[in-house]
Image (cartoon, coloured by chain):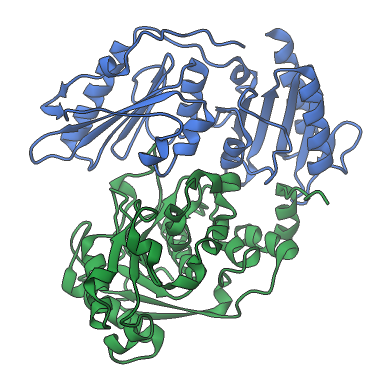
Chain colours: A blue, B green
Amino acid sequence: MEDTSKDDKIALGDLLPQEINGWRAETKDEIYDPQTIFDYIDGAGEVYRSYNFKKLLARRFTKEGKPDIVADLFDMEKSNDAFGVFTHDLEGEDAGIGQGSTYNGGLLSFWKDRFFVSLYSEEETEDTRKALFALGEKVASSIKQEGKKPDVVSLLPSENLAEKSAHYFHNHLILNYHFYVSDENILLLDQQTEAALGIYGEDNEKSYLLVVHYTEGDKASQAHKSFMQSYMPDATEMGLVQTEDLKWTAAKLYQDFIIIIFNAPSRFLAIGTIEKVEKRIGQI
Amino acid sequence: MKKRAITRRDFLRVAAVTPFAGAFASGFRIQEKKEAASRAKVVLIRDKNALISFKKPNPGVIRKMLDDGITTLLGETDPINAWKKLVKPSDIVGIKSNVWRPIPTTSEVEQALKARIMDAGVAEENIGIDDRGVRRNRIFKDATVLINARPARTHHWSGMGGCIKNHIMFVPSPFAYHGDSCADLATLWYKHNLKKRTKLNVLLMLNPLFHGIGPHHYSDKYVWEYKGILVSQDPVAVDAIGVRILQAKRREYFGEERPLQPPAKHIYLADTRHNLGVSDPDKIELIKLGWEEGILI
């Protein structure tokens, strides 16, 4: 599952235009790295660090009497992580830009190759919306290569998978953001583990399927033991338990993967889902 | 002894007998309850004319709102006498502000606070206003009193940005507090004597952000003109009321229960684990003044 998309010669600033629909770039770009990102992003800086980002270029565009437009271009180094950070926040309409995109409330975001791009206007107007889409198209066309999605995501069965609900990540901070499991890192996730979380069903009947790929079989085995002891010490030999909300959780170690289904409505569905993922692992 | 992990199943056990929304609080309380403060007082003041335009506070109205809030909070009729309960002429006072670009504390609020601190006898040169520079600011280093003033908003990593979180710039590595969605933010209040030095918490609800998107966790789409200010001497209580208003707005806007993501559990843990203040609404005396339309609480 190694991602190979790399072209270190690409200069981030060259991927962004100096002008778009009358908005002109301010003279100086700002560059941030994982140590300095909190100087720029108060809210979600930790998210980008969780996806191993290398560099962020921020360019502000201004136009007389109009709201500013801000372009944030993240070099994630690997397309897996560009895709992953895009899946962190999937709210909004599909904008049809790059390899996956959303538009919501004056924010256009997309991923392509190893880049994640966030474009937003400080106020949303019809003009800013047009400018954001034009800017997005321009940046996407400047990025010549396409990236590959992480293989682990393809292990999530598509049947009943809720729209825009598949997330890819590495560590337990992001897992807990999407689905709270534990305050401790009981699955021994780290910056090298690759995990996919899919949400199935709707409203109060949601099930959560987690597939984690460890870099070594030993690590997967240790993580499975840790999870079973902390989360489901009362599980049957099949790795199945009915939780306090009368739903079912099942977990299985398979090769160097751990497969867990949370909140399944029945034991049969829990076991069946695990088996489906096992089959898919056998096919990759 | 090794600390036992708290898992989702601990919350499910509690949720079997209480609503899930409260499970985080109750779950931690079961295991971690210390002897906490018994009660707290919070004043909510709202004024229909608090904003001149979207995001632009009306200075005169803001001054009156703060005066009404602080006199009610401290049981005085005269605002200067109320402020004299918080500061004395010999004090050095730091107003811990918040410069977050989309919704800052605003100069209108900062100057209203500063004017009253001066009215209470503190020399202007002994009053500082700062946010990201507090660790380098001489006044904040020497401050005998801190006034903590910031807007309420949802926050990508802690659930809510409120008064508890506003003191994070006093520590050298803010990201060191990000573990478990900022669960233990309250511990920073025990550094640099912040708990003792902070005499007043002002949580601005003039135009709060109730939902965030994107890297900067912001869109005008999710800001509404609530035109309120919360004041309290208890940073936990003021945040506990603020988060209830944000959650009520989310319920109203989305038409369904849409819990904060992540939950703002640092507020509950500030009470139940760290004994910083009161988070239990049943133990908070909430006094509401002014405009009632759309009050949500």
Residue A97's place in the image compared with B48, above or below, is above
Residue B249's place in the image compared with A268, above or below, is below
- How far across and how far down the image is residue B215, in percent? 39, 37
Left or right of residue A170, residue A114 in this image: left
- What residue occupies the far bottom of the structure in this picture? B77
* Residue under the image location 38 percent in, 68 percent down: B143
Quarter of the image for residue A238 reads top right
* Residue under the image location 17 percent in, 40 percent down: A67
Image quadrant where one finds the C terminus of chain B: bottom left
Q: Nearer the viewer, residue A97 or A7?
A: A7
Q: Nearer the viewer, residue A165 or B267?
A: B267
Is residue B202 among the parts visible in the rendering? no
Left or right of residue B103, residue B214 in this image: right
Left or right of residue B184, residue B75 in this image: left
- How far across and how far down the image is residue A82, in percent? 46, 21
- How far across and how far down the image is residue B178, in percent? 54, 46
- What residue occupies the far right of the structure in this picture? A237
Quarter of the image for residue B86 reads bottom left
Is residue A263 among the parts visible in the rendering? yes
* Residue under the image location 59 percent in, 39 percent down: A173
- How far across and how far down the image is residue A168, in percent? 56, 26
* Residue under the image location 35 percent in, 91 percent down: B76
Residue B209's place in the image compared with B70, above or below, is above
Residue B70's place in the image compared with B166, above or below, is below
Count the numbered circles shown: 0
